Image: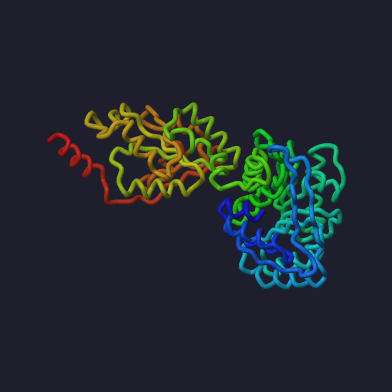
Amino acid sequence: MAANVSAMGGDATLLAVVGHDSASIELQKCLQGYGVRTTFVSDPEGGTTQKTRLMAGAQQIARVDRDVRPTARTQALLLEEFRRVASGHDLIVFSDYAKGTLDHLPEFLAAAAALNIPTLVDPKRTDPAFYRGATLLKPNNSEFIGLFGDYTSEDELLERAQQVLGELSLRHLVVTRGAKGMVYVSKDGHLGSIPTHARDVFDVSGAGDTVLAALALALARGTSVSEAVHIANVAAGIAVSHSGTYVVTADEVRDQLYPSRQRAPKLVDEETLGKLLLTHRQRGEVVVLTNGRFDTLHPGHIRFLNEARAQGDILVVGLNSDASVRELNGSAHPVHSFGDRAEVLAGLAAVDYVVEFDAPTPLKLIESLEPDVLVKGGDYQVHDIVGNDVVSARGGRVAALAFHDGYPATRVVPKISAVRDQ
């Protein structure tokens, strides 16, 4: 779990009980290889937990576990060490395997609550009260049934999960259900079901730890629980497509979350863009649209586009065709062809997609793409922005961003034209 947090871009510390043995040394070296800090409490009477997988080729056929229950003194030392180091962390994850290490979990949760640090718990016991006060509880399907009873439909599952939030003072409950995906409910009323991220399943070992790691990292970064669950679902899909307890990396998750950024050009036609934006909206992402000629790109444009991108998650630039620029500005324009202007815009990190429109105004494009946010430079008043009524009527937002003066096209274009004509 800690290795996954680190590989996905987090800063992880593992607090655990180990023995005086070679396995603890090997474990520390392994974790250091993943960039995980370790805080070990050594139990002189026990040993380091070990899991040995018996493989036939790439297929696991059995697993042999060597578990050693920590002594009461070791458990007390673990709680003492937790209280010492907890304050330096944004979020705390408890993986409770019911092997003795977290027999005093309620005291750990109380200590974290006193420090106002969110907690995520992966449960293995059947006493619901044991997990009271956690920020997020993440049982799998069989663990949920063991804790809260069976259900006959997804609606019944969601209803029971909502009841559990109040009974245990939880903020979120996420249930992983294997091939049926994941469901989540939150105290603020958000709930939903996310289907499995379709991939070939090779080995489910460690998938739950991957989910927990991705959830923890996303929530620590301030991501909404619905988006965090989506990210965790994607990460789990990657994990189960590999043999063994695979460690998922940040690049792999990004490639799955944003395939268009990796495999498709930013310049797209209107029909294709509509389909791409539908996928982004299903992920809960906010689509921002701006438009313009962008014939002589300058620092003012760059600042504006960066600010436009900050209004949401996906920035689409509607770019006037050469014909529409000529219609608006005369036969001497544009200075740069549509292809050149589009290529420059597509090279900017702030821009996710560029789409051509051939009309004097982008009204039809706005009606087609239905952006969540429509922005223009501050030389416009909001009520004068084309498409303001369309976006506002759908509950969207229209913004006139700060105008970056000092780069008037009326001054720049004649200079370019003069040089070109020499």
Which residue is located at x 53 percent, y 33 percent?
A: 276
Which residue is located at x 56 percent, y 38 percent?
A: 280
Provide residue 126's location: percent of width, then percent of height: 86, 53
Which residue is located at x 77 percent, y 40 percent?
A: 61
Where, quadrant-wise, is the C terminus in this rendering? top left
Q: Is residue 417 above or below residue 220?
A: above
Q: Is residue 211 above or below residue 291?
A: below
Query: Horizontal placement of 45 versus 207: left or right?
Result: right
Provide residue 290's location: percent of width, then percent of height: 42, 40
- Please identify the quarter of the rendering in which residue 319 is found: top left
Count how many numbered circles sit on residues in the image.
Answer: 0
Q: Is residue 272 above or below residue 244?
A: above
> Is the image coloured rainbow, by chain, by secondary structure, or in one colour?
rainbow
Q: Nearer the viewer, residue 105 or 163?
A: 105
Query: Horizontal placement of 238 versus 295: left or right?
Result: right
Q: Nearer the viewer, residue 207 or 193?
A: 207
Q: Nearer the viewer, residue 127 or 253?
A: 253
Q: Nearer the viewer, residue 159 or 94?
A: 94
Provide residue 130's location: percent of width, then percent of height: 83, 60
Provide residue 393's location: percent of width, then percent of height: 54, 38
State the residue lying farthest toward the left.
422
- Please identify the quarter of the rendering in which residue 181 is found: top right
Query: Horizontal placement of 140 versus 404: left or right?
Result: right
Which residue is located at x 81 percent, y 59 percent?
A: 99
Query: Horizontal placement of 290 versus 211: left or right?
Result: left
